[in-house]
Image (cartoon, rainbow, N blue to C red):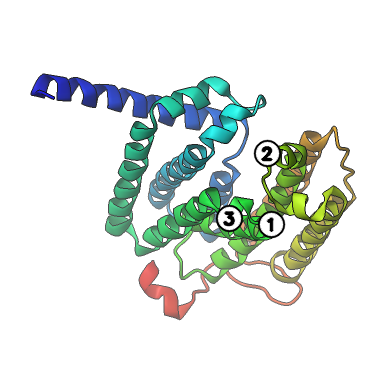
Amino acid sequence: MNRREARCYGGLTLLAALKILADVAIYRIRKREMANLAAAFTIMAAVGLTWDEMGMRLGFGILLNLLAYLTNDYFDVDADLASPGKDQAKARFLKGHMRAALFLQAFLAVLLAVVGAASSPGLVVALVAGAGTCFVYSWKLKHVPVVDVFTMLAWGVFMPLVGFPLDSLLGWIMVAQLGLFSACFETIQVIRDHDEDVKSGTRTTAVLLGIGRAMVLEKVLMVASAAYAVLLLNRWVGLALLVAPFIPMRRDGVEAHWNQVRLVQGLAWLAMVGWIAWDGSSMGLVSSVGKDETIALLGWLR
């Protein structure tokens, strides 16, 4: 390949990478699947970060989400092509430009590592934990029953780590709540995909347990998320989360159920964040943690 051909090939690869990045962003926004980014922003406001730091962390979080979801699409491309419910044009383009997608993932990972190292060691932790969890989930763990749900619980904790300095005690208490929400949504997702997963031979929690018992697990996780909120975040608003286990799920209405649960948990989350922003501390039944309380051992991660 001569120099001119190399430049042409590089230009085409760059254009393909930009289209892949745009496809990932548009698809996830349309599916409302980057809620962790909004949650991270609310944590930034709750713990009282400056506008400059909020802007920097929000930008980092956007790129981290694009990396994580691109990784998921990269591993799922063949399954997406076989599924009539997926965006076929998007999947076909990705399949035809896998090298560009791999280059883009590497570029985003290096860019985020450099920005994190220059800004805050805690952002490097968020990168390794968030993107790393997404990688192992997409590569292997999403097909391991029970582990799939609890890997998403971990992902729900790690992705919003961009929202606060990692020595913030209140920040950790808040992201643990988000992890429990994430586990609830993962359970709904595997229930939704049960029939398709059975046909493809994919083993998930819903395939292992059956839909009935998977629904019971969903209710248990919802009650656990409500109990956690009552005990550690807000003793009154947390009670509202007990509405979620009573939202009915029909086999032909899983998407509606998903949105209804998201509405209940989202509104409760905003109310808890609003209280913290106004009062300066949580109001759990067993503890009240101020936004300025820190974990001394994690001070170097600010």
Q: CA distance from mark 2 to mark 3?
A: 16 Å
Rendered location of residue 65, percent (x, y): 48, 44
Q: CA distance from mark 2 to mark 1?
A: 15 Å
Rendered location of residue 300, percent (x, y): 36, 73
Q: CA distance from mark 3 to mark 1?
A: 8 Å
Q: What residue does disc 3 label?
A: 141
* 58 and 126: which is toward the camera: 126
Q: Quadrant of residue 128?
A: bottom left
Q: Quadrant of residue 17?
A: top left
Inspect the image, locate mark 2, and give the three-letter code of the amino acid beneath it: Ser
* Disc 3, SS: helix
Instruction: Say which residue appears at 51% left-offset and 50% top-offset.
Output: 139
Residue 200 is labelled as 2
* 222 and 253: which is toward the camera: 253
Total marks placed: 3
Inspect the image, locate mark 1, and give the three-letter code of the amino acid beneath it: Pro
Q: Earlier in the sequence, mark 2 or mark 1?
A: 1
Inspect the image, locate mark 3, and give the three-letter code of the amino acid beneath it: Leu
Instruction: Say which residue appears at 32% left-offset and 23% top-offset.
Output: 15
The nearer-to-camera label among 2 and 1 is 2
Q: What residue does disc 1 label?
A: 145
Q: Is residue 118 left or right of residue 54?
A: left
Instruction: Say which residue appears at 48% left-offset and 59% top-offset.
Output: 164
Instruction: Say which residue appears at 61% left-offset and 51% top-offset.
Output: 142
The nearer-to-camera label among 2 and 3 is 2
